[in-house]
Image: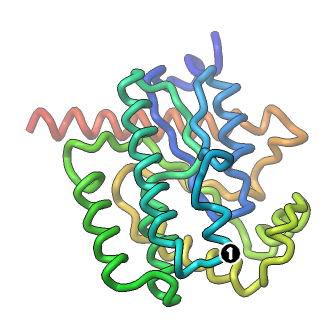
């Protein structure tokens, strides 16, 4: 019996990994995909035509960047569901508007008009009964000190030179966002409770929780349909 069958995880499941920068989303995505024999969906950074311009001028390019991300994530979400599921997704479409676009608006690097246009488009695309939401969103969380330590340890020059105040703001925005998120079921996992880099078996307690959450959610959906 494979791990997917052992923990009763449907082979058409769509699981999205969310959490602040440095919390280990990519590592979790790869570990779950390997354990379940699922495909992965990662953010396309190398082909992004706005990213370099954005870092040079937030105010000039924030709207363009967020629209690009929204379009790409929407297309990716549509492709995943058309394929029939069986995917682990690194970062959700919901974080773009709930955290990043809002942060630019709040900090004055996106105008009110642009922000309203962006959120209107997001709601028209995503916040409808027709948009295929994931079966489960796994939110990776931990203390700010632990997250900051991980950012520093992975050694990306752009991240190391970013002021700590920025990471503190991002961390708090994620906490506020997840506490109000209701687009799909949430499984919160503390990064201190596992070590995927050095202990492969630490993935199994996570798989057990995933199977339980998805089965509970699908039983609830069936009951709601019958009513």
Q: Residue furthest left?
A: 227
Q: Which of 53 and 34 is in front in this view?
A: 53
Q: Which of 30 and 202 is in front in this view?
A: 30
Check disc 1 and report the residue beneath it: 56
Is the C terminus in the top left, top right, bottom left or bottom right quadrant? Answer: top left
Q: In which quarter of the image is residue 223?
A: top left
The answer to whether residue 16 is above or below residue 35 is: below
**Image-based side of 96 in relation to 28, left or right:** left
At 53% from the left and 72% from the top, the residue drawn is 61
Q: Where is residue 132 in the image (x, y as percent from the top left)?
A: 31, 40
Instruction: Provide residue 31's location: percent of width, then percent of height.
Output: 72, 34
- Name the quarter where the N terminus is drawn: top right
In screen coordinates, is 156 left or right of 72? Answer: right
Q: Could you tell me which residue is drawn at 51 percent across and 72 percent down?
A: 62
Q: For mark 1, give the secondary structure.
A: helix
- Asked if residue 202 is positioned above or below residue 159 in the image, the reply reads above
Task: Report x, y in % for residue 217.
Answer: 35, 40
């Amino acid at each position: 019996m494979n791990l997917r069958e052992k923990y009763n995880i449907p082979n058409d499941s769509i699981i999205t990994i969310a959490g602040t920068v440095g919390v280990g989303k990519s590592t979790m995505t790869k570990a779950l995909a390997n354990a379940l024999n699922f495909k992965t969906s990662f953010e396309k950074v190398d082909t992004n035509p706005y990213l370099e311009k954005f870092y040079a001028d937030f105010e000039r390019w924030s709207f363009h960047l967020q629209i690009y991300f929204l379009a790409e994530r929407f297309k990716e979400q549509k492709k995943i569901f058309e394929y029939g599921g069986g995917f682990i997704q690194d970062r959700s479409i919901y974080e773009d508007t709930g955290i990043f676009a809002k942060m630019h608006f709040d900090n004055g690097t996106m105008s009110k008009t642009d922000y309203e246009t962006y959120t209107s488009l997001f709601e028209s695309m995503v916040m409808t009964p027709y948009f295929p939401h994931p079966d489960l969103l796994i939110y990776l969380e931990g203390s700010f000190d632990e997250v900051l330590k991980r950012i520093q340890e992975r050694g990306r020059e752009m991240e190391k030179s970013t002021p700590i105040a920025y990471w503190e703001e991002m961390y708090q925005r994620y906490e506020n966002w997840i506490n109000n998120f209701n687009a799909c079921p949430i499984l919160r996992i503390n990064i201190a409770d596992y070590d995927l880099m050095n202990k492969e078996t630490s993935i199994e307690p996570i798989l057990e929780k995933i199977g339980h959450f998805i089965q509970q959610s699908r039983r609830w959906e069936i009951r709601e349909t019958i009513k």
